[in-house]
Each structure stands twice: as structure tokens, then as C-alpha cells.
């Protein structure tokens, strides 16, 4: 018990914050509750969890946030909610309203083991706690063409991993196109006619660089603050995140060629990542992305600032933005971002390309093309030409497997397996990134 230590409240801890009811209702002694509503005291009574060697800071235990942390470890959501409630009941029933973080975790781990979620899940919990405390930047790139499930996968992964920021490229593309003199067309690049596949990819990469310039501020802030983000979009070229500025070599968390099928591959915490094929849901909308843009490539710093301010004023920052890139041969690395990271944790970058079986993808694309919304943008579009253009872009994105890209084959019939595989895969990538940060020498500022 640590009574009398009314000091600063820390809310940055992964389990910090108050229950939703705590924000609106005052604390009452347990004796004021009737027998009929006795269980409601667990919503009213606050438990302070003290941090630090001298227990000089505390946060208020939140069952909701605790259950989210447990879900990250791959404990099913309904079980995580029960464990969080059991822990709060245990503390309150034993009058432990002031408890240290270590004592809290001892009791939590006992409850986890009692429900069959032992060492493997406890280790994941500890690993994710270290990840949050170290503020290691995490960038998850969900790439692919239209109708492969990018938005669905990105949103579901954000919920499973308790990540607050999902950035989409569509909005940045439109803001740059309508609010600046950036050379971006109203018609999507894959809906235009080109003389060759090379011309299509060249224009695709150019637009990627323009949009990437518009996202520079959001990415730099995420890197500086150590905040994880998921970026998804059709122009998202992962190659710009796989190159280290010093040696021009891949800097992602993995380096093998990979094409995964989570319905076939089972990931083990201690096993190396296997190479196969994966499957997910469909119904994605067309998105737009970005890449590194040199300072003379058509968008001024003032214009970028104006777009960033517009995004902030709309409340879109950290929720609906994205980016992409060009070929590794053309890359000019954002040296400002890299230099800022030299004195902090090494960022974890996980690029994933979603792909679908050609027959299934074509059927979805034809339905999507026929929609009124799309025809309003491209009234003269030829179906076969559009599908061919999208396939060309998909092949380009998949060409970076040699640089550490993971290609995930998706299907509506195996969505749960795919999502579960990606969840485990990302946990492995985070764990590897944490180990690299621990072993890496601290750079001088």
C-alpha cells in the first residue's frame, strides 16, 4: 500500500487511463452499493498503479486498456475482457487500491495461466510492454492494387495490435491535387492509356513521389515521437522504406524472399518465417500513395505545409493518410528523417503486399469498375485495359520481394487465417526489432 503519495498521474503507460464510467461518475465507498448492484463497484472504484523505483508516479487501471493489451498477445477478445475484470475484482476485493506495476503483473500473469494462457502469452505481453516503453517507431506498409482488402486488413490489424494510427493515401493525393499545383491528375493513373508498361510504371512512381512529399511531416513526427502507424494505399511503394541512407541497402526487419499463405504456414514464436502463400478478404477501394520526392519535383515546402495544416484541421492526421515510392535505383532517401533517427531507437519497417488469385481478382475488379462511383471518375474506361494496368502495377509491387517484401495472397474464404497469420508475423517482426535496438550501440546526438 502506498497511501499519501498523491503525485503526478502518468497516462502514457499502455495500461493507463480510466474506465469509461470513471470519467463521468465519482468514486464511492463500496458500502454505498446495494446487494442487487454490488458488481457495479468495480466500475466506480479506482485502482492506482504506481510506477518507478520510488513509486513516484501512478496511473489509474483501466479494464478496457488492459484487455486491449491482452488482445495484442493473441488472447481472444472475450477472454481478455474476462481476465481484465477478474484482475480488477481481485484487487478491489482485497482492498489493493494502491499497487505497484510489478505486483499488478504478478497477479495478471497468474490469472492468464489459470485460463490456459501461460508462458508464450506472458512473454508476448512483456515484449509489447518493452516495445511501448522504448517508443520504438513502427511503420507497417499494406500495399497492393484495388480490391485486394488493404483497408480491411489494415483496420483489423490496427485493432488487434492496439495501434491508433491507420494512414491512407487517398486523402493526401486529393488534398495535394486540389489544394496545390502538384502535378496530379483527377483520373487515376491505372485508368489512363499508356504506350507501354514502362510508361505506366514511370508515371505511377512519379505520382508516388509527389504524395510521399505530402506525407513527410506525418512520417517524421511518427519517427520522432516513436509512434506506430499503419499505412495502406494503392500507390504505396515499399522500396523507399527498405533502404538505409548510409549503405543503400535494405533496412527492413526481414530480408528473405517471401510469398506467404497463412492458411498453410503456422508461425512459431521461435521459428524462422516460412515462405508460402496467404489469403484475405476483398472489397478495397482505390487508394493513392507516395514516395521520396526531391526538392525540385513540383511541390513547394509551403504547399506541403499548407496541405499538412489542412489535414490537421480536418482531424485526419494519424487516421486516414498514406504514401508510396519508386524504384530502388531512383531513390533519394529522406536524410532529415534518417538523421533524426540516428540518436533514437532503430525504426521497425514491415512492408506487406496483398495479392489475389487472378480469376477472383478480375471478378471483383469488374464489379468495382461497373459501379456508378467509379464511372463518374472514368466514364470512358475500357475494362480490360484497366485490369491490365492494375496487374502491371501489382507485378511492379511484387518485384521487391528480393528487398525483403512479404507478398500475401488473399482470399475471402480464408480471411480469419490470414489475419491471424499476419498478427503473429507482425509480433515476430516487433520482437526482432526490439532485440536489434537492445544490441545496437547508442549513437551520439
Image: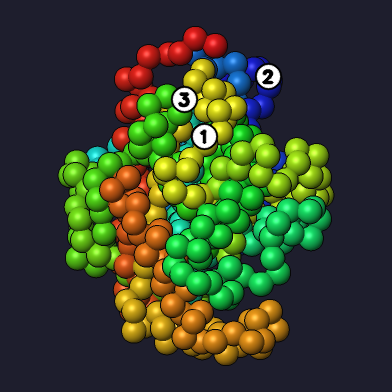
In percent of width and height, residue 293 lies at 60, 43
Relative side of 265 to 235, left or right: left
> Does residue 200 appear anywhere in the picture?
yes
Total residue callouts: 3
In the picture of the structure, the residue carrying the numbered disc 2 is 7
Tell me, yes or no, whether the two marked residues, 3 and 1, touch with CB atoms within 8 Å: no
Q: Residue at x 55, y 28 (%)?
A: 335
* Label 3 packing within 10 angstroms: few (<14), some (14-19), many (20+): many
Q: Quadrant of the C terminus?
A: top right
In three-dimensional space, the C-alpha distance between marks 2 and 1, rounded to whole angstroms, equals 45 Å
Front disc: 3 or 1 = 1
In the picture of the structure, the residue carrying the numbered disc 1 is 333
In three-dimensional space, the C-alpha distance between marks 3 and 1, rounded to whole angstroms, equals 18 Å
Display colour scheme: rainbow
Q: Earlier in the sequence, mark 2 or mark 1?
A: 2
Q: Earlier in the sequence, mark 3 or mark 1?
A: 1
Q: Residue at x 72, y 45 (%)?
A: 299
In three-dimensional space, the C-alpha distance between marks 3 and 2, rounded to whole angstroms, equals 29 Å
Relative side of 164 to 443, left or right: right
* Label 2 packing within 10 angstroms: few (<14), some (14-19), many (20+): few
In the picture of the structure, the residue carrying the numbered disc 3 is 345
Numbered disc 2: secondary structure: loop
Image vertical order of residue 110 relative to residue 369, above or below: above
Amino acid at each position: 500500500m502506498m497511501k499519501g503519495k498523491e503525485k503526478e498521474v502518468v497516462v502514457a503507460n499502455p495500461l493507463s487511463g480510466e474506465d469509461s464510467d470513471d470519467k463521468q461518475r465519482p468514486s464511492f465507498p463500496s458500502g454505498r452499493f446495494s446487494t442487487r448492484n454490488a458488481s457495479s463497484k468495480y466500475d466506480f472504484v479506482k485502482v492506482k498503479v504506481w510506477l518507478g523505483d520510488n513509486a513516484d508516479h501512478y496511473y489509474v487501471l483501466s479494464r478496457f486498456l488492459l484487455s486491449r493489451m491482452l488482445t495484442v498477445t493473441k488472447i481472444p477478445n472475450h477472454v481478455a475482457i474476462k481476465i481484465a475484470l477478474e484482475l480488477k475484482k481481485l484487487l478491489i476485493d482485497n482492498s489493493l487500491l494502491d499497487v505497484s506495476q510489478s505486483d499488478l503483473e504478478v497477479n495478471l500473469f497468474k490469472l492468464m495461466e489459470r485460463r490456459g494462457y501461460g508462458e508464450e502469452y506472458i512473454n508476448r505481453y512483456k515484449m509489447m510492454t518493452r516495445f511501448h516503453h522504448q517508443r520504438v517507431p513502427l511503420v507497417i506498409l499494406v500495399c497492393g492494387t484495388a480490391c485486394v482488402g488493404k483497408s480491411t486488413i489494415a483496420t483489423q490489424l490496427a485493432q488487434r495490435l492496439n495501434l491508433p494510427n491507420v494512414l491512407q493515401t487517398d486523402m493526401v493525393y486529393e488534398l495535394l491535387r486540389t489544394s496545390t499545383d502538384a502535378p496530379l491528375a483527377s483520373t487515376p493513373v491505372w485508368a489512363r492509356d499508356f504506350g507501354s508498361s514502362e510508361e505506366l510504371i514511370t508515371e505511377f512512381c512519379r505520382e508516388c513521389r509527389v504524395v510521399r512529399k505530402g506525407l513527410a511531416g506525418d512520417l517524421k513526427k511518427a519517427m520522432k515521437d516513436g509512434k506506430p502507424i499503419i499505412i495502406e494505399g494503392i500507390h504505396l511503394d515499399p522500396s523507399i522504406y527498405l533502404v538505409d541512407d548510409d549503405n543503400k541497402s535494405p533496412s527492413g526487419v526481414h530480408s528473405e524472399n517471401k510469398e506467404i499463405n497463412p492458411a498453410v504456414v503456422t508461425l512459431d514464436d521461435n521459428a524462422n518465417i516460412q515462405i508460402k502463400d496467404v489469403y484475405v478478404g476483398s472489397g478495397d477501394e482505390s487508394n493513392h500513395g507516395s514516395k521520396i520526392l526531391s526538392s525540385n519535383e513540383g511541390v513547394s515546402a509551403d504547399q506541403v505545409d499548407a496541405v499538412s495544416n489542412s489535414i490537421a484541421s480536418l482531424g485526419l492526421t494519424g487516421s486516414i493518410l498514406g504514401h508510396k515510392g519508386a524504384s530502388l535505383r531512383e531513390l533519394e532517401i529522406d536524410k532529415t528523417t534518417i538523421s533524426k533517427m540516428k540518436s533514437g531507437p532503430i525504426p521497425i519497417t514491415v512492408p506487406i503486399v496483398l495479392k489475389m488469385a487472378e480469376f477472383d481478382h478480375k471478378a471483383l475488379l469488374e464489379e468495382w469498375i461497373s459501379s456508378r462511383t467509379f464511372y463518374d471518375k472514368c466514364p470512358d474506361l475500357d475494362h480490360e485495359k484497366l485490369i491490365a494496368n492494375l496487374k502491371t502495377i501489382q507485378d511492379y509491387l511484387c518485384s521487391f520481394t528480393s528487398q525483403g517484401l512479404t507478398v500475401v495472397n488473399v482470399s475471402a474464404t480464408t480471411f480469419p487465417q490470414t489475419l491471424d497469420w499476419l498478427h503473429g508475423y507482425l509480433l515476430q517482426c516487433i520482437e526482432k526489432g526490439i532485440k536489434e535496438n537492445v544490441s545496437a550501440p547508442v549513437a551520439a546526438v
